[in-house]
Image (tube, rainbow, N blue to C red):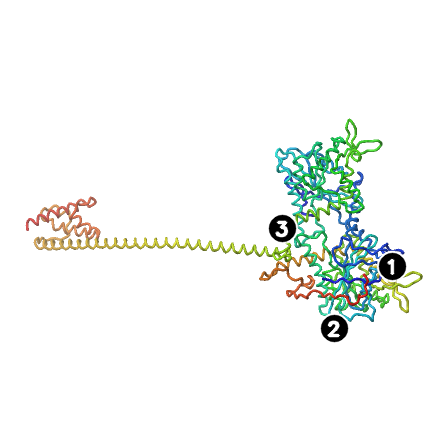
Amino acid sequence: MWAFTYPSLPLSSVMATHGHKTSSLLSSVCLYSSGWQKEGPRSLTMSGHVGFESLPDQLVNRSIQQGFCFNILCVGETGIGKSTLIDTLFNTNFEDHESSHFYPHVRLKAQTYELQESNVRLKLTIVNTVGFGDQINKEESYQPIVDYIDAQFEAYLQEELKIKRSLFNYHDSRVHVCLYFISPTGHSLKTLDLLTMKSLDSKVNIIPVIAKADAISKTELQKFKIKLMSELVSNGVQIYHFPTDDETIAKINASMNGHLPFAVVGSMDEVKVGNKMVKARQYPWGVVQVENENHCDFVKLREMLICTNMEDLRDQTHTRHYELYRRHKLEEMGFMDVGPENQPLSLQETYEAKRHEFYGERQRKEEEMKQLFVQRVKEKEAILKEAERELQAKFEHLKRVHQEEKLRLEEKRRLLEEEIIAFSKKKATSEIYQNQTFMTPGSNLRKDKDRKKEPGYRLELLCFDVRACETIGGRKDAEEAPILCKTKVPDHRRSSQAKAIKMLEVCFDFLAVFI
Amino acid sequence: MDPLRQSPSPSSSQASSPRTLSCEGLGYVGIEAVLDQLKIKAMKMGFEFNIMVVGQSGLGKSTMVNTLFKSKIWKSMMPGLRVPTPQTLQLHSVTHVIEENGVKLKLTVTDTPGFGDQINNDKCWDPILGYINEQYERYLQEEILITRQRRIPDTRVHCCIYFVPPTGHCLRPLDLEFLQRLCRAVNVVPVIARADSLTIEEREAFRHRIQDDLKTHSIEVYPQKCFDEDINDKILNSKIRERIPFAVVGADREHMVNGRCVLGRKTKWGIIEVENMAHCEFPLLRDLLIRSHLQDLKDITHNVHYENYRIVRLKESHALPRGPGWVNLAPAPPTAPGPAPTGTRASPGPAKVCRWAEDNSDEDF
């Protein structure tokens, strides 16, 4: 904490000096005004002209350099005169075309204009609701408006929370004032109006106006106004009241507060009245002058909106509505000013704590997922192993079966071979025996045909021939041959060989008989 | 231009690019009245201004401040009654509310006795930078609260007047070091103190040498060239830049000269009038600080220096390692976030405050 010292100047010595060209401060010690929050600063009297009275001018110069920014939102049914009123207010033809009545949803259309009057530059943004009150089902009518206002606040909040920000040349698009156009039925507020105003009153400064006021007579107008205000009050709608805390404008503001809502007529057409051209609407029964205070409250509206309270409207938007939005938004995100032990928490700390928490959460989730994944993999692996084992078992089994089969077949083959050998032995013995018994000269290798011609003696030679054929034919024939002896003759044999074999059989029988 | 400004599409609620229309010829609208509204609001709220004076002792800082604001902000120090020089640099602030023609100004003056007075003046700028950064930190903390105050109290130092001793040669190493570091954190206005010990020619030579020194070391003093917005500013500011640093003399006593009562210093060879442009350049300093550039000083502090501090601060709190017991923001670094902030952040301890309680026993407020 900084210690503040108190000036120890005796008042008398200062006051004795020059009252000439200095300001009137010498006579009074300035009291601690309510604008300061610090403790301790004491007032000081100066002994000469210092010159900081030019401070407001410096401020004004800077503002002139930067330019001003003002955003108006006009809410009202199609055709109620919003665009015309804005044109009349700012004395300019902003846009020409009329809107259609057939939009399915309420939209907002915003346009920015740069106006200049003497050396003051104003960046004016007019936001119009298009299609408000046209739909058959009006339940969603006011939501787009609320969303738009919130979006502007959000954009500003985002800019403010950035690390590298440039607030001083940020185009402020937050809505500063909402002109709500009430249609001149003369009875009371419509439900739609009530609902819309109720949802907007905490977000924006609302100034209700009675549009097309030339449709109501004076007496009806008074009653209508009273009815409207009482309805607004009884429903708890907070409309904007002009500030009455500054003496210079308190009186006029207070009296204007009594005239709310303003009954306005807008027109850009000029009509000659008397000897000058005024903005007016011409009817067969008379001329309604826009700028005539007896005819409508247009001048009051312009006075209040632009000349007297524009700065206050902007101020209220920034310090009240925007701060409210900001607080809600940040609290929604979980930030608090005061921590669990009532220690003041900073935004930064909370943010970091949240980030930490979020990362922790994310880490945990990652771990979980990893574990799940690992588990699944294990399961799958087990299944696959199981399948592998089964396959292995099957393979083993098959192999065994195969082995057995092979052994059996080997066995069979061995048997068959033994038989072949036995058979060939038999043949050999019988042949030897025949050789011994039948000592016929001649070559063994006589042809079949020759032998066939000689009956009786061709048997043994036939045997030789067959065997020679068999040996030439290969083992395959040899294997089949004994089978042939036992079984019937296969068809694919040459008929001569078949015959020969048949002969052989007959001869054996014959021999058996002889021996 | 803001990237939100696009042509209106049917489904969006974006604003179109601004068209320029003049409503001059069609009658009165009343936009001008917003200037009056601004003025009224400003007068109601009042202004704040924080100034810091830095320099070795005996250069006339307190007297200068008294002369600037034409009041006894500091009790003037008679040579005999001086408080012994403090062993370490201490800062102390005084706040006053002064009013002129309905305009209220809350003035805070911070003095730095003991600056550059020790044998070893190494790092004597650290407490000063720490103080400046602490003010920024306070403002930042207020700004990021959820429920903010309607108007955040502004204690940031808007201007730092640096007193250069009138050696007549050039800037000393201490001066150069200090100026280099401070120019990045705050608006610095160097002045040649006790200029009555230099003749006019010596003053000019000294001034040129100082300007060359500043240019060589690329020290940007206020008004900074890079913030000139348009041609008018450039012209105005370059005139000022030619005369920086101002050769000033401070005096809070009045003497009679030619029948007029003027502030001045009386010597055996004449009276040096403080507000006489032929004698010293005090009026220039006063005009710069108060009459013409006060708002600009505040703006540059708010839009440039404070934003720079904020950027560095918000970035570094992300880079801190997260460990047990880490809850608070890092303590604000003492050095200015300009040339190569070092990795080791030695916290200097808050700048010490001392009370003048013993002296002012005879106060009657």
Q: Secondary structure at mark 3?
A: helix
Residue closest to the eye, B312 or B71: B71
The residue under label 2 is B119
Depicted B347 relative to depicted A301: above or below:
below
Instruction: Give coordinates of residue A299: x percent, y percent.
Output: 78, 38
**Horizontal side, residue A482 vs residue A249: left or right:** left
Residue located beneath label 3 in the image = A331
Left of A19 or right of it: where is A428? Answer: left
> Which amino acid lies under the numbered mark 1 shown in the image of this protein?
Met
List the single residue furthest toward the left.
A514
Q: Residue furthest bottom?
A: B119
- Residue A97: x and y in percent read 70, 34
Q: Secondary structure at mark 1?
A: helix
Disc 2 marks a residue whose amino acid type is Ile
Query: Are labels 1 and 2 on one chain?
Result: no
Which numbered mark, 1 or 3, is in the foreground of this view?
A: 1
- Residue neighbourhood size for the residue with mark 2, other residues' Cα within 10 Å, grouped as few (<14), some (14–19), many (≥20): few
Q: Earlier in the sequence, mark 1 or mark 3?
A: 1
Q: Nearer the viewer, mark 2 or mark 3?
A: 3
**Residue B342 bears which disc, if any?**
none
- Label 1 – label 2 distance at C-alpha: 44 Å
The residue marked by circle 3 belongs to what chain?
A: A
